[in-house]
Amino acid sequence: MATVTPRAALTRLAGPRVRLFERETHLGYLLLIPALLLLLVFVAYPFFFGIWLSLSNSQIGQNGHFIGLGNFQFERSDTVFIGAFMNTVSYTAITTVFKLGLGMIMALLLNQVFPAQRFVRAALLLPWIIPSVLSTLAWRWMFDPTFSVVNWVVIHSHFSATGVDWLGKTTSALAALMIVNVWRGTPFYGIAFLAGLQTIPVDLYEAARVDGASRLQQFRVITLPMLRPVLLVVLLLSTILTFADFTLPYVLTNGAPFNSTQVLSTWAFQTGVNGGYIGIGASISLVLFPLLTVIVAGVMLTLRRPE
Amino acid sequence: MAESEVEPGKAPREAGFTGTPEAWRITDPRWSRRDFLRTSSLAAAGLAAGPLLAACGGSGSSTAASPAPAGAIPKPRPGAKIQLLQWNSFVPAADEEIRRQAKAFSDANNVEVTIQTVTGDQLQPKTAAAVEAGSGPDIIQMQYGWPHLYDTACLDVGDVVAILKDKLGAINQVNDAFCKVNGKYLAVPYAQVPNAWTYRTDLWQQAGFTSFFKTWDELAADGKQLKSKNLPPIAVSLGHAYGDAITMWYPVLWDFGGREVSSDGKHVTISSKETESALKWAIDTWKNGYISQNTLSWLDPDNNQAYHSGLITATLNGASIYIKEVYTTATNHKFAAVSDNADQAKSATSAATLNLIFNHAVMKWTQEADTAKAFILYLMDQANYTSWLNASVGYNGGPFKALSTADIFQKDTKLKPFLDVIGQGRWPGWPAQPSKATAQSQVQFVIVDMFAKAVTSGDAKGAIADAEQKLKRIYELPS
Amino acid sequence: MAAVTSVRAGRVGATKHEIGDRFRGRLFRVYIPVALFTFITLFPFYWMAITSIKSNSELLDHTKNPLFVLQPNLQNYRDLFFKTNFFHWMVNSAVVAFASTTISLVSSILAGYSLARLRYRGATAIGWGVFVTYLVPPTLLFLPMAFIIAQLHLFNNYWALILTYPTFLIPFCTWLLMGYFRGIPRELEEAALVDGASRIQAMVRIVVPLALPGILSAGMFAFTLSWGEFLYALVFMSDTTLKTVPVGVVNELIKGDEFFWGELMAAALLGSVPVALLYSFFVDYFVAGMTAGAVKG
C-alpha cells in the first residue's frame, strides 16, 4: 500500500505545468478533483438513494413508490418520534454548550507549561481516541443496573442509600448519555482550539501586554476573534456529528426505558433497518436535513466572506 | 444474478397505486417480474418432473445454479465455496461443533464451507445490508420472523423441507410459522433456544417453598414471600433485551387472554379487559416489589450477571445461566449444586411460551444453491444434529419431532424444562401469522414497553392506549 | 523560582499565554484545573484497567470494593492475545486508518485550499454540496453503500473501508482546514505571489507549513474517526482475520447473552492506549510552537 496515491502523484506532476493554470478557476477546480471524485463515486448514489428512500414506501429488499412527504406526515403522529426529536435536540444543545466551554478551557490549559505535561496531554486525548463502541461499553458497565461503580461510590459516600437506577429512569438515562458524550467529545474541541491557538502570532499578545491589556482582555480581543473560523467549523461539525450520533445511545441505552431515550438515529435504525420499514427509517434520519442544510449554507457563506 | 439497478424516482412497473403513505402494498419487488416468472416456472416444471425422475431412478445431477428437481436430494458441487452467517452461540462448544461439521462436509465433498459469526444484535443489520446489496453469505441464519421480512431475498426451499419432514417428522409450529411465507417455505427450520426459569434451590428452601411456582399468581405469591424473608427477588427484564424481555411478557399477555392483533392480522385488539388484567397483575407484582424493580434497563446479559453474583433468586432465561454454573470449567461454580430449572408459568386457561427461533435461509443471490441446500441437509442429519444438541448442553432444542431430544437431556434431568417449553411455543404477534408487521412490532418492543410503562406509572389504561396507537400505525394500514 | 519559570517559558518562544506568574496563581488557574480534568478523563480508564485484571469471580462479586483488585492476574490479556485474533484486528485497523487518513488529508488539503482561497464561480455551491452529503447519516447510507461495494466486488476487502471512510472524513477535514487556512493572513501569500511564485508554490511553501497544526489535527481526527468506525466495518468485513478492532472485539467477546467484561476492557485499553501515546507525540510537535517561530522569523 503506497502512501503516494495516484491523485497525489498527479498533483505533483502538475507542478511544473502549473503556470498554465494561473487562472483561479482552473486551479480551483483542479484542486477539487480528488475529493469530488471519491465523493461522487461513493456518496452520490447512496446519498440520493437515501433521500429517495425517505420519499418512498420502500421496505428492505423491496423498492416502493415515490410518495412525496408521506413518511414525514406519518411520523408526525408517532409519539416516539416526537420524543426522539426532542431528545436529539436537547442532547445536542446541552452537550455542545458543555463541550465548547470545557474544550476552550482544556486548550488554554494544554497551552501552558506544567509538570508531567506530556502525560497529561496524552491522557486528555484518550476519551476521543478510544473507539466509541468500546468506551460506551465501559460506561455501560460503569452505569450497570446491578454493578455500577458509580452507584457504589454514591452509596458508600452516603450521598444516597440506594444509588440511582441510571439507565432505568428516563431523566438519569438521558443525563448518562450526555455525560458520556461530553466526556468523549471535549478533547475534540480542545485539540482543535489548541491548534488554533498555535496559529495566532505571539506578537499580538506581546503588543497587547505592552499596551497594558489584562489577560481577560487579551482573550476577548485577540484569542476569540482569531479563533472564530476554527470555532465556527468545529462547532458546526460537532453539532452535525452529535445530531447523527448513533453508537453512544445505541450501546448505552438502546432506547430503554420504554423508548424514552430514543434519539432520531437509533429510532430510525430500529424502525428502518431492524423493523424493515426502510422508507420510514430514512425519513426519520433525514428530518433534520433541511434545517442543517440551511445552517451549513450560512456557515459556508461566512467562511467564504472576504476579510 | 443481475438485479435491476435502483433508479430513484422511476415509476414502478405496476400501476394502481395512489401514493398515499398508508397504502403500504408493495408492488415493485427488487427482482424484475421476468426473473420471478422464470424462477417460478422452473420450480413448477421441476415439481412436475420430480416424481417422473424419481420413478426413473435418476437423482438429477445438479449444475451450478439451476435448482434440482423436487424429490431429488441436492448434491454439493465439487469446488464450490459457500458461507453461512449465524450468531455467536453462548456455548462455544456448539459453534465449534458446527465448524467441525462444516469441515467434515467440506472434506468429504471437496467444497469449502465457512461459518461466520456475529453477535445477535449485529446479525440483523448485516442481513439487511446483504439483502439491500443483493449479495452476501449464501446461507443466513434467520432469527424469528426474518423470512417474512426478507421474503424477496430468500430462495424457495420447499424441496429441502419436504425431505426433512419425511425423515424427521412434523415441524414445530413456531418454526413452521416463521419459515412458511404465503404457503412457500422460504427457510429451513433449524433450532430453538428455549427459555425457562432458572432458580436457586437453596434460597427457595430458605423461603419455605416446597415446589416452584406454576402459575402467574403463584409467582406473585412466591415473590411476596421472598420479600418478606428478605431474600433476593425474582427478576426479569423490562428493558429492550433482545431475547429475555419478549420471552417473559408475551406469555404473560397471552396467558391472561390478551391479544395484540386479530388472527387475520388486520385489526389491533390490544385494548381489552384481558390485557388490562395482565397489566394489573404486572403492576401489582412490580409495585409491591414481588419482582425486582431494577430491571427497566436490563439487556440480555444482565439477568445472567445478577444470578451469578447471587443477587437474584430466579429468572427466565435460556439454559446459559445453568450451563455456566454447572458446566463451564473456567470460573463460577458458586451455585452449581443449588441451581435448578422449571417450566414457564401459566394461567388457568393458557400455557403459552416464547423462545428464540432460528431457521436457515438460502439466499437468492447464491451461485451454489445446491451445495448450500446439501450442507443444510447435512447439518440436519439426525446424527449430526444430535451431536450438536449434545455439544450445546441443553442450550438449543430441535424443531422436528425426531430431533426433539438428545442424550444430554437424559443425562441431566434438570435440563428437562427446556424441552418442555418448546411444545407450547408461540411467536410475537400470535394469533396472527408472522408478517412484516409482527416483525416491526417485535423490533419496537411495543408489548414489552407497554408493560414497562404500566408498572412505572401504575396506569394500565394509559399504557394500553399508547400501545394501541403504536400498533395501529404498524398493523392497520388500509388494504 | 516562579519568575525563572516564566522567563524560561518566554524564551522558548512558544505562544504560551502566561496564565499565572506566581505559584499560587498557577495553582488555582493551572494545576488544579489540570488535575481535575485529568482525574475525570482518566477515571473510566482506571476502571477499565482494574476490570481487565480482575478474575471473573471478583468481577461479579458485589460485596467487594469494586475500585480495587485483590487478586490481579493477566488472564484476560492472555486470552485476548492467544484465543482471539486481536493482533490481526489491530493491524487491520491501523492499515485502514492510515490509508484512509492519507487519502482524505491529501484530498482535503487541496480542496480546502481551493475553497478557502481561490475565487471562482460555483465554489460556494460545490463547497455546500460536499458538506451537505455529510448530513445524511451513516446509519442510512450504509445500506445503499453495501450495494455499491457488492457491485465492485469489494466485500471482505480492505479497499471497501479505505474507499468508503473518506466519504465521512473528507467533508470534515476540508471544513476544518478551511477554517485554519482562513486564519492565515493573506498578505503572506500575496507577498510570495508578488515575488513570482505560482499559486501552487505559494500553497505548498507558505500556507501548508503555516497550517501544519491544523493539518496535523485534521489528520489526527481523521485517524481517530477511522480507527473507531463501527458500522461500515461490521457490514463490509466478514472474515475474522480481516475485522477491525471495534468489530472484532464486540463480535467475539460477546457471546449470546454473556459479555466477557474483563477481556472487553482489556481490548478497549489495548485498542486505544498505543494510539494515544502516538498522538501525544504529535501534540508536542505543534505545541512546541514551531509555527510561531516561523511567523516571527
Image (tube, coloured by chain):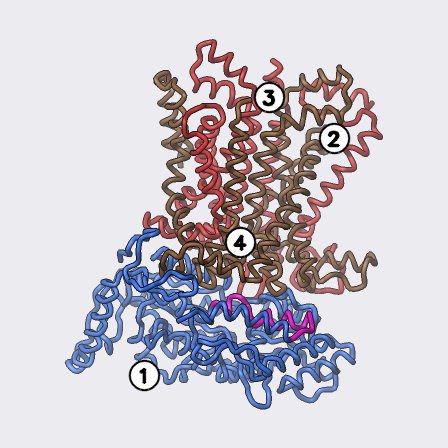
Reading the image, the residue beneath label 2 is A114
Q: Secondary structure at mark 4?
A: helix
Name the front one of labels 1 and 4.
4
The answer for which chain carries disc 3 is C
Query: What residue range appears in magenta?
Result: B440-460
Q: Nearer the viewer, residue C117 or B290?
A: C117
What shade has chain B been given? Answer: blue
Q: Is residue B245 visible?
A: no
CA gap between label 1 and label 4 equals 47 Å
Residue type of the residue flagged with mark 4: Ser
Identify the amino acid type marked 1.
Asp
- Locate the C terminus of chain B by quadrant: bottom left
Which quarter of the picture shows residue C161? top left
Residue at the spot of label 3: C291
Marks 4 and 3: in contact by CB < 8 Å?
A: no
Residue furthest left as drawn: B56
Q: Nearer the viewer, mark 2 or mark 3?
A: 3
Secondary structure state at the residue bearing disc 3: helix
Chain A painted colour: brown
| Front: mark 4 or 2 | 4
Is residue A236 at least partly visible in the picture? Answer: yes
Please name whichever residue, B309 or C102, is drawn nearer the observer in this view of the structure.
C102
The picture places residue C11, in percent across and down from the top left corner, at: 71, 17
Task: Name the one closer to the observer, C277 or A90.
Answer: A90
Closer mark to the observer between disc 3 and disc 4: 4
* Colour of chain C in the rendered structure image: red
Is A246 magenta? The answer is: no
Compared to B269, does A60 lie above or below?
above
Identify the residue at image location x=52%, y=70%. B471
Q: Which residue, given by chain and number where applicable, does mark 1 sit on?
A: B166
